[in-house]
Image: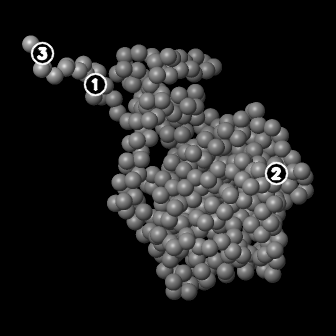
Amino acid sequence: MPDDTPPRVLRLPQAPDAIELRHLRAFVAVAEELNFGRAAGRLYLSQPALSRQIQGLERLVGCDLLNRSTHRVELTLAGEALLDRARTLLAGVDDAIATTRSIGGEASGRAGRLWQPIADRNRLGGDLGEMGSEYETMLAGFEPPPEVAVRPVKAGGVPALRLTPPDASPSRVLHLHGGGFVMGSAYGYRPLAGALAAAAGCEVVVPDYRLAPEFPFPAALDDAAGAYLWLLETTPPEQIVIAADSSGASLALSLLLALKDRRLPLPGGAALFCPWIDLACTVLEEEPAGPQPVVTGRVMRQCVEHYLAGHTLDDPLVNPLARPDHLRGLPPLLVQAGTGDHLVGQARRLAEEACEQDVDARLELYPVATHGFHLFWTFLPEAARALDQAGRFIRDVTTPSTQHRTGS
């Protein structure tokens, strides 16, 4: 008689219940960095705490995942088998949580509430000084990662802050802060710069460049150039990356173009967060999906007027989209923006124009409904993820194999 009994399927043994996501995140970080110091900085952990998590995971799975010596860290065969599977699992969890939180609006709502005092000043016609004070107050609500050391420095005669994570690599980042050329400060940007330092595993220098209207163009560019040339005195150009957010991205592009025009060494790359680079307002703005303080309408025009003080917008040095061919010869670019940012079109346009000029440009979009979302890395998952990606980009372009570049 035929046997109608359904076939029995052997079940694979379940993973030990005590394995937690933190164990897998710790393992993936060490496996990707192959350095406990850099992995600890990336996870905002101390090295002893990270070592305990790795040891705990190895006890739970019952085998060694890493071979350690005083000089190097290597994956075992078991570690190699776990790495891709752990990455897939963590990516799925992160996407699920990010999507849920974004739909629920909790994190975005918090970002909106933080922007609200500045938005109110904008709506009521407050002057830029008042908005700048509100901006600094908002930034003061955050702190850099505790393990990142913050010290003042004179960078080519420009007051600046240097933020250094534990076991920093020889690479260095010059971060040019946002604020519409009229607001922001190195002190206010300590939290974002510190997070970027931890993600990249290297020192970040934030110059306190001069602001308009007291110091119009080219004062900020001169300060940025002075700080960059100061870095060149001790760091090869291929180990330097320029990072910037919002209007700082416009300043960063001006710096890159000025270096190229003067045939000075170009950095290994540039990471531009939520770039505001279209000072002539030629790129159609998209319908905002969230609060858009500071860089909107009247304030944007006022900032540009103060910054340029009569300097022509036809100059590609201040308006690179006017002559995209001037982008040719620039180093690799990472461009990140939020899909709900009404300036996201500028990020897309920049990446497209750069690629057409044979620049290695990569565009990353995140489901965020606010401009400058990187500032909120302490509670916004997309911001933390974006900074992690920026850290990887910085490490990739500053590897020893990167060729030395000069403006040509």
Residue lying farthest front?
A: 1
Quadrant location, the N terminus: top left
Tags 1 and 2 in contact by the CB under 8 Å rule? no
Left or right of residue 237: residue 39: left
Q: Amino acid at mark 3?
A: Pro
Left or right of residue 14: residue 245: right
Left or right of residue 311: residue 6: left
**In the image, which is nearer the foreground, mark 2 or mark 3?**
3
Q: CA distance from mark 1 to mark 2?
A: 53 Å
- At 37% across and 56% down in the image, what residue appears? 101
Callout 2 secondary element: loop
The circle on residue 329 is 2
Callout 1 secondary element: loop
- At 78% across and 63% down in the image, what residue appears? 324
Residue lying farthest left?
A: 1
Q: Earlier in the sequence, mark 1 or mark 2?
A: 1
The image position of residue 379, as x and y in percent, is 44, 54
Q: Which residue is mark 1?
A: 14
Q: CA distance from mark 1 to mark 3?
A: 34 Å
Visible in this render: residue 338? yes
Name the foreground residue: 65 vs 2.
2
Write down the quadrant of residue 226 in the picture: bottom right
Q: Earlier in the sequence, mark 1 or mark 3?
A: 3
Q: CA distance from mark 2 to mark 3?
A: 74 Å
Callout 3 secondary element: loop
The image position of residue 341, as x and y in percent, is 53, 66
Q: Amino acid at mark 2?
A: Gly
Q: Which residue is mark 3?
A: 2
